[in-house]
Image (cartoon, helix red, strand yellow):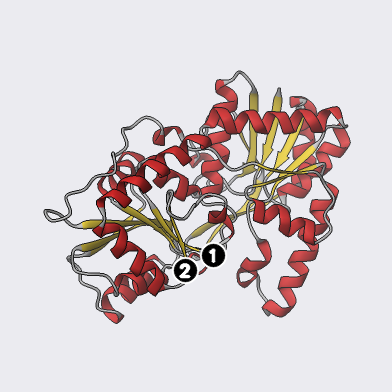
Amino acid sequence: MRILFVTNNYTPYSGGLISSIDSFTQQLRAQGHDVLIITLDFLGEQHNDPDYVVRVTCRRRFLYKHNHMAIPYKPTQEIIAIAQQYKPDIIHVHHPFLLGVSGLRAARLIGVPCVFTYHTLYEQYAHYVPGPSWLTQPIIEWLVMRFCRAVDGIIAPSNYVKNYLYERTVLTPIEVISSPLRTIFLDGKTKQGKWAFVTKHFELLVVTRFVHEKNVPFVFDVFKKLPEYVRLTLVGYGSEYENMKKLAFDELNLPRDRVRFIFKPEQSELIKLYANANMFIFPSQTDTQGIVVIEAMSQGLPVIALDGPGQRDIIRNGVNGFLVYSAEHAALMIKVISAHGDLYAQLTAGAIKTAASYTPEYIVSRLLEFYETLRNNQ
């Protein structure tokens, strides 16, 4: 099958969406399918792309809050031309705006199905759009729902998203397919659910983007309620990274010998951080899927997560972690788990078993089945 991915976000960005696209691409290509990725040209000649990545012409590039931005020049014409030459069987778009709209138009012109992955609850990010949220939020929702009704199929990363769309009378076929694990999380050895309760610290790990919607301060509230044998490592990047460090150390006076921040480590270092941790905390309530939750579980980490859309399909209380509803609840569960070795071992085994159902082979097989169903209905 020839598959055309169209995305506004790709390298030099990183994060869940880019990890998802890369994981799908690697596995599809490994199975003999042809994949072409169309995205924006953020860096010009500085990009070091593989031959299956095409950048559309962007005459304006700039930085906004330390983020690379690019404005495409006639993207619809360019994507149509690429599609006509590439002759895909499916056009799969990853945004309802900008290049996603151009991808839909290209699909209509060449007569192939257009699939859209609903990665984000877009109206909850209205604070990034200039103007009052009471005005921008309903406009964003209307535009996104109109796009959802126009495509041929929608991939929802969680059941929450599927139900969310059905409640808004979106009748487009929807399939719940999560993102697969990246291969780097399949090659190492996972821990066996044991830790020396007396001889070492209990290590908590957070891997996130440091932005408002990821709710990082919640983790600090939890940590303040924990005993001294617990240590905390926060890993990631984002516009609020330095602000979160100031909040932790200057305003909340968290102990520097028990709390550390690590900025955007290499993949090999990230795996080591997972290996050295005992438990994972997930504070976001806006994510449509918890990719990092699955990554943590693949390395044998039980997960404590604030209840939210992306984690509800993954976490089973007492099996692989716990969903919590407050900082007090989270702190209590961490203390209980860290004090009971049998429970910790049980959660670790459950986490590893859960992650096994997110292998690239299985997830991509479901994606291909959905593609074929849409092609047969074309």
Q: Can you tell which of label 1 and label 2 is closer to the viewer? A: 1
Badge 1 is on which residue?
285
Find residue 3 and report its horizontal and vertical position in percent: 70, 29
Q: Secondary structure at mark 2?
A: loop
Mark on residue 297? none
Q: Earlier in the sequence, mark 1 or mark 2?
A: 2
Find residue 77 and report its horizontal and vertical position in percent: 80, 41
In the depicted structure, whether residue 98 falls above or below residue 26: below
Image quarter for residue 61? bottom right
Count of numbered badges drawn on the protein: 2
Residue that appears at 42% across and 49% down: 320
Amino acid type assigned to the residue bearing label 2 in the image: Asn
Mark on residue 215? 2
In the image shown, does 127 or 369 lie closer to the viewer? 369
Q: Are marks 1 and 2 in contact (CB under 8 Å)?
A: yes
Amino acid type assigned to the residue bearing label 1 in the image: Gln
Crowding near pointer 2: few (<14 within 10 Å), some, many (20+)?
A: some
Which residue is at the far left?
199
Q: Is residue 51 visible?
A: no
Q: Quadrant of the C terminus?
A: top right
In the image shown, does 314 or 121 lie closer to the viewer? 314
| In this rendering, position of residue 140 left or right of residue 281 | right
Q: Quadrant of the N terminus?
A: top right
In the depicted structure, whether residue 264 falls above or below residue 360: below
Q: How far is the residue under mark 1 from the one under mark 2?
A: 8 Å
Residue that appears at 76% across and 56% down: 165
Crowding near pointer 1: few (<14 within 10 Å), some, many (20+)?
A: some
Find residue 232 and report its horizontal and vertical position in percent: 28, 61
Find residue 74 and report its horizontal and vertical position in percent: 76, 47
Residue that appears at 25% across and 51% down: 341
Residue that appears at 49% across and 38% down: 181
